[in-house]
Amino acid sequence: MSPTADLVLTGGPVHTVDPARSRATSVAVRDGRIVAVGHDEVRELIGPRTEVVDLKGKLLLPGFQDAHVHPQGAGLELGLCHLADTVDPAEYLRRIREYADRNPDVEWITGGGWSLEAFPGGAPTAEALDAIVPDRPVFLPNRDHHGAWVNSRALERAGIDARTPDPADGRIERDADGNPTGMLQEGAVHLVGKLVPDPTPEDQLAALLRAQAVLHSYGVTAWQDAIVGAYANMADPAPSYLAALDQGLLTARVVGALWWDRERGAEQIPELLARREELHRDRFRAGTVKVMQDGIAENHTAAMLTPYLTGCGCSSDNSGISFVEPGELKKYVTELDASGFQVHFHALGDRAVREALDAVESARTANGWRDTRHHLAHLQVVHPHDVPRFRALGASANLQMLWAAHEPQMDELTLPFLGAERGARQYPFGDLLRAGATLAAGSDWPVSSPDPFQAIHVAVNRVSPGAPEGTPEFLPGQRLDLGTALAAHTAGSAHVNHLDDITGSITVGKSADLVVLDRDPFAGPPEEIAATRVLETFVEGRRVHTADDA
């Protein structure tokens, strides 16, 4: 007789994300590994010491994997002046004043998470902050961290005035006389951000653990940290990961994407190789390099093949910013690929997408096909000629599904400046799938919610959860079916993370990274997908999250 199991989850359904056997009703676990997947026969492994979880008709899934997330930054924001979860400017000011009053000894008022859509043109002013915090510098990145709202005291500390030139990779918003208004874009954020005191190591570790608990509560058992290194006002999370490992507190599997300093060149590659060796530790490894190739569409820094439109619908002279010169990018990616690094691109505009794919093509031509699994994140605008290149080059599409919907930031700050033809090329999930691309998924938290079911809801419905009745679907021809969206969040991201040999599906021999839901979303209407909640999360058969009402 086979040895009994430590854990049996039964009474399914079980969605395995295994094409050979997509559905089951029971799973057995021993020593952290899945030892049986099936039906009533699995119950034969139940012994006197086996823990039995009755699923009671609720769905069991493999653990979710977030292929693009910033946990330490998200955890820090939760503990500072947290502005997420609202788009009301008055509420932002109330929270900022309350935080300042509650922390009279804090030198800088910082935190962030505000939304561009809350302000005309996505640009709040220093004047509003000066009225409530005149005596201390205020530095508040917006939710996508491509811009920051600052007060006059912060501008003074940084020496920013009408004579300060825009950095090559950013912009200082100004009034008609050239005076800074209090909004900094892209590289200009660093002019103030570099002055903000770093959080203590203790604060950073607490932030990472706070974020890990949040991710586990949403069923996330592994992730790729999209920036490991110091960037703008974000502290390097690597020391926190090492401290968590040393203290036995890191319960997730993590891949770190080492930050590519766009102000430097190939001379940094030996340093990245050294960091890769230094950070190769049990549940954490850093075999990826993150290249941010462009900005975002809302502030017109996403790199486009043709210029943005102006407010009157006329063509402008601005096509966005390629942060790394395309010819140099090819050289860097080829060398990184030859060194065995995966490259994780931030590529949002269609020109940035093409430049990233061109770089991957150069690497394939020079080095042959290596198991480096390069991937492009965001993919807001993709030219149709580039869609089939993902499959041809083995480049994965890392989707932030939650963004593919009509909401004020899209309708007011994006579509009018892209134009109809380019606006219809946004978030082409369906086209990428039909072209044979490997789909992965990431939240980009704290830019947006880390809840996979919020994102999956949009992928399936192309409408935001809770959108007003009558909200039109956003390019419905690009929607995904539920099974495909779930696969991107599990097996697809496991592939990108080089974890598909041990995770990503419920298959005998793989790690028992499992998620118990409060329902079977396949059995309900698509418009209720976002209501799905996680009751329990397991990593290697050990509970790392239990909902209060589970």
Image (cartoon, rainbow, N blue to C red):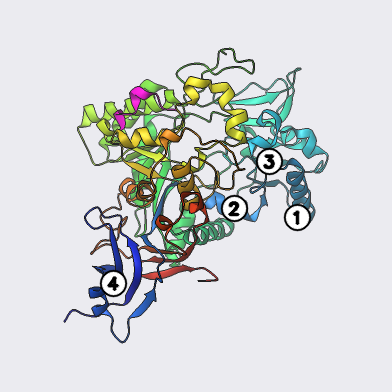
Looking at the image, residue 78 sits to the left or right of residue 284; the answer is right
Q: Earlier in the sequence, mark 2 or mark 1?
A: 2
Label 4 Cα crowd, 10 Å radius (few <14 / some 14-19 / many 20+): many
As drawn, 431 above or below 281:
above
Which sits in the foreground, 94 or 76? Answer: 94
Residue contact between numbered discs 2 and 4, judged by CB atoms under 8 Å: no
Label 2 Cα crowd, 10 Å radius (few <14 / some 14-19 / many 20+): many
As drawn, 514 above or below 439:
below
- Front: mark 2 or 4: 4
What residue span does the magenta drawing correspond to? Answer: 381-390
As helix, strand or loop, the secondary structure at mark 3 comes to strand
Q: Earlier in the sequence, mark 4 or mark 1?
A: 4
Does residue 346 appear anywhere in the picture?
A: no
Label 2 vs label 4: CA separation?
A: 38 Å
Quadrant occupied by the N terminus: bottom left
Label 3 vs label 2: CA separation?
A: 14 Å
Which residue in the protein does label 2 denote? 76
Which residue in the protein does label 3 denote? 139
Label 1 Cα crowd, 10 Å radius (few <14 / some 14-19 / many 20+): few
Label 3 Cα crowd, 10 Å radius (few <14 / some 14-19 / many 20+): many
Which labelled disc corresponds to residue 28?
A: 4
As helix, strand or loop, the secondary structure at mark 2 comes to helix
As helix, strand or loop, the secondary structure at mark 4 comes to strand
